Image (cartoon, rainbow, N blue to C red):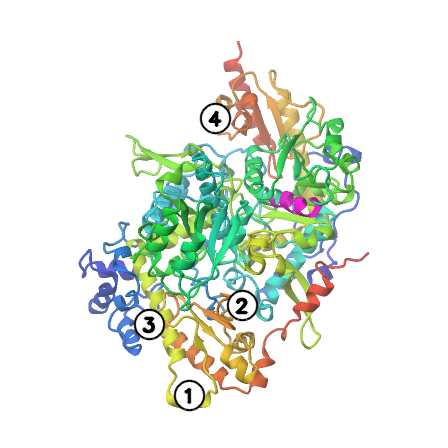
Amino acid sequence: MSDIFEFNGAAGSGWSQPEPMMEDAADTVPPSLRRLNLPEWPRASEPELVRHYTWLSQRNFGIDTGFYPLGSCTMKHNPRINERIVQLPGIDRIHPLQPEHQIQGLLSIFYEMQEMLEICAGMDQVTLQPVAGAQGEFTAIRCIQEYHRSNGENHRDKVIVPDSAHGTNPASAAMCGYDIIEIPSAEDGRIDLDALRAAVGEDTAAMMITNPSTLGIFEPEIAEAAEIVHAAGGQMYYDGANFNAILGKTDPGRMGFDAVHYNLHKTFSQPHGGGGPGSGPIGVKSHLAEFLPSPLVGRQEVEDGGATGDGYRYFWKTPENTIGKVQQWHGNAGAVVRAWAFYRRYGRELELMSEHAVLNANYLRHQIMNPDTETLAGIEVMPVDGAPTDVVKHEFTLSMQPLKERTGVTGKDVAKRLLDYGYMSPTLYFPMIVPECLMIEPTETESREVLDKFADDFLAILAEDPELVTTAPHSTDVRRVDEVWAARNLILRHPGTE
Amino acid sequence: MYVALCENSCNEHSRASQFCLGRQEAGCEDLDQLPNLGREQEMLEAMGLQSMDDLFSDIPEEVRRTDPLPLRGPQSEEEIWADAQRLLGANIDLDSRPSFLAAGLARNFVPTMVPMLATRGEFLTSYTPYQPEVSQGMLQAMWEFQTMVSELVGLPVSNVSMYDASTAAAEAITCAVRVKGRKATQKGVVYVSQFVPPHRLSVIENYSQGGGIELRTLEHGEDGRINLEAATAAAGACAVYVEQPNAFGELDEGVMKLKEIIGENTALIVGVDAVSLGIVEAPGNYGADIVVGEGQPFGIGPTAGGPIYGLFACQKDYLRLMPGRIVGKTIDEDGKDAFTLTLSTREQHIRRHRATSNICSNETLIALMGAMHMSLLGPEGLERLALRVAAATEATKQAVCAIPGVELVDPDTPNFREFAVKLPGDAGEAIAHMDEAGVLGGLDLGDWWDSMSTCLLIGCDERTSQSDIDALTSALSSWIEEVSP
């Protein structure tokens, strides 16, 4: 293995630049402020670096490499037109503080996205500023906090989350200063209304919940849950991580939610990029709109047709009691533009996207859980459904607990063995309420053939010699990585040449 | 085009699922984004289901949407591209005219290699590297990124990015309060420099709601420099946050003396212009505990403000309470070198409400672009880049200050990238006038501080040319002639 710091050959820089426009530029910085030793960065030429990063890319698995059934992450295909569009100077070379009349095209896209997301979620006002799902959660909880404060209800200091919630939910609420009440799920994995009734009270600020839940199942009693929380004076927050399942079929507004975040990097095809960037707009009902971060995009009709020719002039506007900023500019505009391009492809047919996401999840679940007799005969123990229901939504969970008890093969072992077959592993050990959990989300962009093959391979692994599975992976760039060693030795940077 | 083609043969309001069947009848072959379009029925039948509606039978009727989404019709790739060109083409981009608007962002030139390689599908379409065995490429690139950031700022630890400079500053403050909270004699108190841009202060205020944090102002003197005498009040607080350069692009030697004044028990957090560190001392070398900053000048254009990325580096004693993802070097089962995410027990997916931050998605791909740009520059390239910005700043400053009626807000400070001038009239009007002359003249500081409505913040960069400067001074002069009595 070679790392980038082995490049130390090229004299000067690997990238030529013009001369500074003044000879004595260094003198602009007083000696006492001058840096004496430059950072030890690599010294490499472009051809060396192109090869280095190409080599690194080849040691990385993306959706483009193969099937990526990572539950809760909605790893759908990322259309390439999106990447082409964000290279246009009209987005790449734009400063967020340019005068409004210079960025009418961008503002019109923002406006269109605000409106589209409002329609899809049944909300009254959307802000595009939060740059990740977690930041969307944080922003919405901050708005809810200010709402309660403005009503003189500072005593509401508790946020309720189900035990199956994404970790970001309690973490985001805690960052706003809230205490967290975690309520247990019912036996079938759904929300336990009795537990919710017992948890709400005068101190309830909000409930945070995703629907479909992290088990991939729709909460049929969601409207009642909303009534319970509202009756106690709390607000309902919708974690939109699983929005891909329900577009056009229902929406958080109908379910009784007051605020929602969207993951443009899940539902609307912004690439995940190895961990980001994301984009986490939020939508709220009208009573929360005055607290949203600033600015939002508004528009007014103009007679000259406007700069984009659609008859409007677009402008920034500040909500009356805004919480201010959560990101320093207007959010991840590039992600919003990519999501816009994705939305334009479907338009009102976004429902079709959700139908296919749900079709694929149910189909894959069916193929895994109903092997033919011959295949079944070779399998000592089958996984069990994380939540036994007739249909799931966009994802499903499998418990590998029986396998672990019988053979010692864990969910993690199966996940690692899938890597040998050329798949990304499903989400592992989440939600925590399902023992030895594998969470599988195929998305709408996988073909039936891929799903069939994955089911076959998955079942084949269950029939394999446990020794082969527990020692997997065998064919990856590195074998099973020692995470304990990493945490014990903490080699977090190259040691350098000192 | 799949849907658009079908529209000819289907009722406008037909449900989507019927629509697919219509597609087959119409003989449409374009699958576009949905590989199973037209095969729904065979897949449903394999599961023993009749229709798409069966898949949604679990959604109670009272919350079901029955009408179609009131949105526009679908478009083909060609049509989307045409609209994107038309709408984004209606924007006036920074490269199309002399531009002096920076405000913390750089009108940089990103090496061609960077977007070409960073958008390779293996990087672009991967998730957070939770499975290190098939993610060594991104993990190694981020470990190299951590090393380069660590070298740049002079601190041993870096994460793999925050959202931007402002959230990095905000989370540095909450991190410092966690680390220093116990020993601090001023419980929960954090001093923030008076000359931090207001949008950053707003982010800091939002992020400070949780930890019982009290924000106080670290005053600057008349000359713009930190009031070091007043700074003694910060000794015993949890943290001090200052920027070098400050919001006006001013470099202040006082920042280098702060650690001595505030002492060991108070964290010094310094926000930097990352490029400046090619010629300006790294804060790690003068006692900073945490360094944050905007990574954007390395790797990506201004992109209307995002995605960009925040730098976050710290001393080792902050490591276990810091936000964000961290990559560590390790070994695999065979003893071979490998990389993996480490110290995850700080993070929300494990620690939930006791996590050090809620951050999950970060800006990894943009940090990767940054790493590529930094490695191309190398140490000498970084220095050259910083000198180019310094030279452009000085040349512009001299030219602008030569205009009668224009004065520097703080005449005796060195500047990097930006400088603030006082005008004989409203800065907003000056900007509007220059705009008409085809020059983006800077930022109206009245937008940031009411008391500065006659002040203009002029930003330069490595691409500022003599003809840009001439255009600026000519446009500004003509406005001054107009407003001067």
Q: Is residue A13 at all visible to an observer of this figure?
A: no
Which of the two discs, 1 and 2, sits closer to the camera? 1
* A440 shown above or below A162: below
Give the Cα distance between marks 4 and 3: 67 Å
Both labels 4 and 2 in a single chain: no
Q: Residues within 10 Å of mark 4 (few under 14, many from 20)?
A: some
The answer to which of B61 and B100 lies nearer the viewer is B61
Q: Is residue B214 left or right of residue A95?
A: right
Say which of B393 and A211 sits in front.
Answer: A211
Determine whether the residue tagged by mark 3 lies in a helix, strand or loop: loop
Q: Work out whether disc 3 and disc 1 sit on a shared chain.
A: yes
**Res B436 quadrant in image:** top left
Distance, label 1 to label 4, CA atoms, is 76 Å
Q: Read off the residue under disc 1.
A: A375
The image position of residue B74, as x and y in percent, is 29, 55
Tag shown at residue A390: 3
Query: Which residue is tagged 4?
Result: B437
Amino acid bearing label 3: Asp
Q: Determine which residue is flagged by label 2.
A: A61
For marks 3 and 2 on the same chain, the one whose residue lies earlier in the sequence: 2
Identify the subunit bearing mark 4: B
Secondary element under disc 1, as helix, strand or loop, is helix
